[in-house]
Amino acid sequence: MIGRLFRLALLFVTAFLLIRWLFNREQRRTVRDFIHTLAIALLASSLLFLLLNLAGIRL
């Protein structure tokens, strides 16, 4: 379990450093906005599935 978490953390750090190295400031802002929008969409969809599950509707 710790090995999987370490690999996931290593993947995120590598992706962060790669984005920082490859993109300029304006492009990094665009990537940050995209990731922020994606995170909100994932939270909204998980909340929707939770509400449907609590209502007894299983997809």
Image (cartoon, helix red, strand yellow):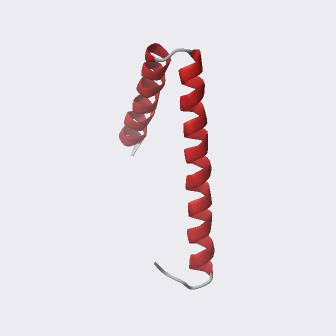
Where does the image place residue 48, in percent across and percent down from the top left? 60, 68
Where does the image place residue 11, in percent across and percent down from the top left? 40, 31
Q: Vertically, is 38 above or below 54? A: above
- Residue under the point 48% across and 25% down: 16
- How many marks overall? 0
Observer-nearest of 33 and 11:
33
Q: Vertically, is 7 above or below 55? A: above
In the drawing, does residue 3 fall left or right of residue 49? left
Q: Vertically, is 23 above or below 50? A: above
- Residue under the point 43% across and 40% down: 5
Observer-nearest of 19 and 13:
19
Indicate the quadrant where residue 10 lies: top left
- Residue under the point 63% across and 74% down: 51
Where does the image place residue 33, in percent across and percent down from the top left? 60, 35
Indicate the quadrant where residue 57 lies: bottom right
Indicate the quadrant where residue 29 lies: top right
Where does the image place residue 53, in percent across and percent down from the top left? 56, 77
In the drawing, does residue 40 fall left or right of residue 5? right
Observer-nearest of 32 and 5:
32
- Residue under the point 45% across and 14% down: 21
